Amino acid sequence: MEHVTVTFLRDDNIDAPILIEGLPGIGHVGKLVADHLIYELGGEKIGEISSLHFPPQVVVDEQGVTHLVKNEIYRCEKDGKAALFLVGDFQSTSAEGHYTLTERYLDIAEDLGVGRIYALGGYGVGHLVESPRVLSAVNMEHLRPEVEAAGGSFENAGNSGMIVGASGLLLGLGEARGIEGICLMGETSGYIVDPKSADSLLTVLSHLTGIEVDHTSLQQRAENMEQIIAKIQEAEEGKGREELSYIG
Amino acid sequence: MEHVTVTFLRDDNIDAPILIEGLPGIGHVGKLVADHLIYELGGEKIGEISSLHFPPQVVVDEQGVTHLVKNEIYRCEKDGKAALFLVGDFQSTSAEGHYTLTERYLDIAEDLGVGRIYALGGYGVGHLVESPRVLSAVNMEHLRPEVEAAGGSFENAGNSGMIVGASGLLLGLGEARGIEGICLMGETSGYIVDPKSADSLLTVLSHLTGIEVDHTSLQQRAENMEQIIAKIQEAEEGKGREELSYIG
Amino acid sequence: MEHVTVTFLRDDNIDAPILIEGLPGIGHVGKLVADHLIYELGGEKIGEISSLHFPPQVVVDEQGVTHLVKNEIYRCEKDGKAALFLVGDFQSTSAEGHYTLTERYLDIAEDLGVGRIYALGGYGVGHLVESPRVLSAVNMEHLRPEVEAAGGSFENAGNSGMIVGASGLLLGLGEARGIEGICLMGETSGYIVDPKSADSLLTVLSHLTGIEVDHTSLQQRAENMEQIIAKIQEAEEGKGREELSYIG
Amino acid sequence: MEHVTVTFLRDDNIDAPILIEGLPGIGHVGKLVADHLIYELGGEKIGEISSLHFPPQVVVDEQGVTHLVKNEIYRCEKDGKAALFLVGDFQSTSAEGHYTLTERYLDIAEDLGVGRIYALGGYGVGHLVESPRVLSAVNMEHLRPEVEAAGGSFENAGNSGMIVGASGLLLGLGEARGIEGICLMGETSGYIVDPKSADSLLTVLSHLTGIEVDHTSLQQRAENMEQIIAKIQEAEEGKGREELSYIG
C-alpha cells in the first residue's frame, strides 16, 4: 500500500487560488467553519485522501454502509471566486504521518494552483469566552497587516505558542514552497464544540477571502449551545466550570 | 525481512468465491464461528501469513513445540460450495500494520477469485444479552437487503459507529477493489468469550452463504458458559454485573 | 543509516555448529550463563551488531569512554567443540525491531554454519524457588527427547505460554530456515538477578552441548545472593516476599 | 518527504575543525552554553535541518510568524579559530529518529571537515549544587588527559552511566567515523534552567577549544536565578527542596 493515496473524482477545471483547511481540532472550530462554507456554497467533492497514517477503521453511516477513514477535498465557487477545502474527521495518528500527509496536501495545492492556504482551528483558553477573538499566525511577515485589517488578532504572539498538526505544518512546510499561509484560531473554552467561536472566525475569513455566506445556521447552532450551557451551569451551580464535560 | 510473508502449502484448486474472516476480537465471537465452521467442514490449511506487524513472540504448544505468531488461511468445501477462511490468534500491533496486512489479505483474496468477504466479529454492549442480535454493516449499499433477509440487523446504523482493525479495513479497502464486504457482529457483553452470540451469528452467516453445519458443539459450549455465568452471578449477588471478569 | 549494521572483527575460522543466545531477560538468567561460559572458555569477540532498533544512547565505561549500544558475537572453542555466543545489554525497543534484528542474527548463523541455536532465558514464577527447574521449548518436535535426557523439563508445555523477544523469534524464524532451536528457561522469581537458576541452566546446557566448564564462580555468586536474600527476609519479616525489590 | 532535509544558506568558506552540539537537555545547560557562544562570537547561521522525526508543529514568534520546528547550524570564527554549532529547540520524538538524525549531523560534520565534536549537556543530580563540576566522557581513550587538564571531571565514570539522545549518539556513531567526541555535562539539579552550571561548563570548553568569550551575561543570569531560588526557598521553608518546580 502507498502511504498516502489521493484520488480525484474529476480533473478538469479544479484549480483555485486558495485552500481552506478545516480538519478536526480544539472545539471543532475550524471544522464547523469549513463544513458551513461548503454547505452554503454548494461545494463539490473533487478528491479523496486515504492513508495508513489514519486510524485503521471504517465509519458506519446511517444506511449501515462503511466508509474508509479519509480526508476530502471540496471545491466551491461564488461570484468568480474559487476555493478548495480540505476537510475530514481524522488527522494522522503519528508524528511522521503528520509530515507525510501535509507534504501530500501541499503537492495537491501546488498542482491546483493554490497560492494561499487558510488553516482554521480553535485556540483553547480553558474557560468559556463571551466574545471570542480570532487569534492568528502567518508564515510570511508581509501577511500580517492584511489579517489585522480583516479583524484577526495577534495578541497571542509572544507567548511561545505552538500550532500542532496539519494546521501548523501547512504553514511551516508551505513556506518553503512559497505558498502563503494564514492560521486563524477562534478562541474557545476547549470544553465544547463551539459554533459561536466558529461564527467569529467565519467573519474574519470572509473579510480575507471576499467570499460571503449566510451565517444564520451557524448562529442558530451557537444559540442552541448557549442554552445548553446555561442549563448545565444552573445544574452545576456551585461546582465550578471546570467540571463541564465535553459537549458536541 | 519482508513486512508480510505469505506461504501457500499448495497451489492447485484453491480458489473460492468467498472469504470468511474470523480473527480475534470482542467476545471472540468471530473467531468462535470461523473455528467452528473449519472444524465441522473439515477445512484444510492452505496458507500461512507471518509479519513483523504481529507481536514478536512464539506460542508454545502442548508438546512444548514453538510456533511463530501467524495468521492462517483455510479452505473448506461442501456440496460444491467453497469458502476460504482467514483465522489466527493475533492482529497487528500498530495502525500502519493493520493497513499493510489487510492489503495483503485482499491481494490473496483477489488472487484466489474471491468476490465477497464476510468479516465476523462481536458488538460489545457492556451487559449480558439474552437474545443476541447480529448487527451488520456492508461496504456497498446493494448488499443490505440480502443481509436483512438472512436475519442481519442494521439497528446499529446511525450510531456513528466505527469498525476497527482487519474487519473494518477488509470492507473499507475491499470496496476500492470491487470486492463485496459484509460485516456481521454478534451482540455480546464484552466480558466473556461468547458462544451464544457466535451461535446466532452462525445462523445468519449460513443463510447468506448457503453452507449449513451442525451447531451442536457451539450450543453445548454456550450452555456451559451459561452455567458458569449463573454460578458467578449467584456468588456475586449484590455486587453488580459490571464486576464480572473476563472469562474464556 | 542501515537499520542493522553487522561488523566482523575477523573473517577466518569463525564457523561453529551452534549459537548460544544470552541477551538480557527475566532474572538475567540467560545472560549470566552466556557471560559465564564466555569467561570460562576464554571466548574471543568476533563481531558487533548495532541498530537503530536499540535504545538511542551510549554506555559510559569505567574509564569514562563511551560505547554505542550494541550486541556482540563471541566464539569459544574447547576440545574441538566450537560455539558462537550472541550477548549484549539490550534488545530491540520495538516489535518490528525484534523481527528485523532476529532475521539478521539468523543470517549470521547461516553464514557461519550454525545448525542449532540455544536460546537461554528465565522463567518468572513470582516467588523464590528452592530448586529451580530448567523449563524448555523446542522448534522441532524431534528435539524434545534429547532435551529431556539432558535434564530439561517440559512441564510448562500446555500452559498456552509465549516466549517473547529474541529468544522466541530465534526459534520461530529459525524453524523456517531449518535451524534447530532449543529454548532453556531457568525458573526464577523475577525479583532478583538469579545465579542459582543460571547454575541449573548451565548444567542442562552442558549436557546438551558437551561443553563442560567450572561452575565455581557462578555458585559463589549464587551463595552471595542467598545471603543477601536471607538478610532482606530477616529485615522484612512480616512484610511478605512480594515487597522484595529487584536486586542485581 | 525526505526523512531529514538539510538546507545550507551558503556553501563557501563554511568548514571548521570542530562542532559544538547544544541541543535541549537536562537544565538546558548545553543549550545555554551554545547559545551564549553564538551570541558573543557573532555567529552566522549557515544551515537548517528539518525532519519528520521532529514534533509535527510550528513555533509562533513574537511577530506572529510561524517557524517550522528545526535544528540550526551556526558558524563562528575568532582569532582564526572556527567552530560550527548545532542548536535548536527540539530533538527527535523516536528512538529511530535519534539514530537517523545523528547520522545526518555526522554527514554534515564530515563534509565540513570536522575532526572533533563537543557534545554539551547537563548531568542531573536531583539536588541544588553549590559548585557544579563538569562531568565528562570521551569516545576515544586518548582524549581523557586533555579533558582532565582543561578541568573536566571523570568522577562519574564507573557508575554504569548512559548518555541518551543526540549527545550520546554523536560520540557513539562518530567513533566509527574516526571523529573525536567529548561530552561535557554540567552538574545540575534537574529542577531549573541552570546558567551557573552553564558558566562552569563554558570555562572547561574554552580551555579545550582555546576560544574565550566574555561570561558576564551568563553570570548575570546565574545571579538572577540564585535570587529566584533564594526567594522560593524562603517561601518553601519547611517543605523540602524536592517540591521546587521547574523554573526557566
Image: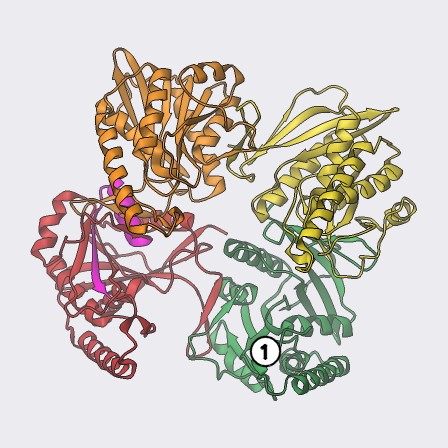
Chain colours: A yellow, B orange, C red, D green
Along the viewing direction, whichever of B95 and D97 lies nearer the viewer: B95
- In percent of width and height, residue D81 lies at 71, 73
Q: Is residue B185 above or below residue A123?
A: above
Badge 1 element: helix
Disc 1: host chain: D
Q: Which residue was labeled with disc 1?
A: D243
Q: Which amino acid does label 1 sit on?
A: Glu
Q: Which residue is drawn at 81% across and 54% down?
A: D64
Q: Is residue A55 left or right of residue B150?
A: right
Q: Which residue is drawn at 45% across and 17% down?
A: B148
Q: In this view, does C83 lie above or below B162?
A: below
- In percent of width and height, residue C229 lies at 25, 78
- In percent of width and height, residue C211 lies at 14, 63
The stretch in magenta equals C165-188
Q: Is residue C174 magenta?
A: yes
The outermost residue toward the front is B238
Q: Name the image quarter holding residue A86.
A: top right
Q: Name the image quarter holding residue C139.
A: top left
Quadrant containing the C terminus of chain A is top right
User: Is residue B112 in view?
Assistant: no
Q: Is residue D50 left or right of residue B65?
A: right
The outermost residue toward the left is C149
Q: Is residue C172 above or below residue B108?
A: below
Q: Does the magenta stretch include residue B187?
A: no
User: Is residue A103 in view?
Assistant: yes
Along the viewing direction, whichever of D109 and D97 lies nearer the viewer: D97
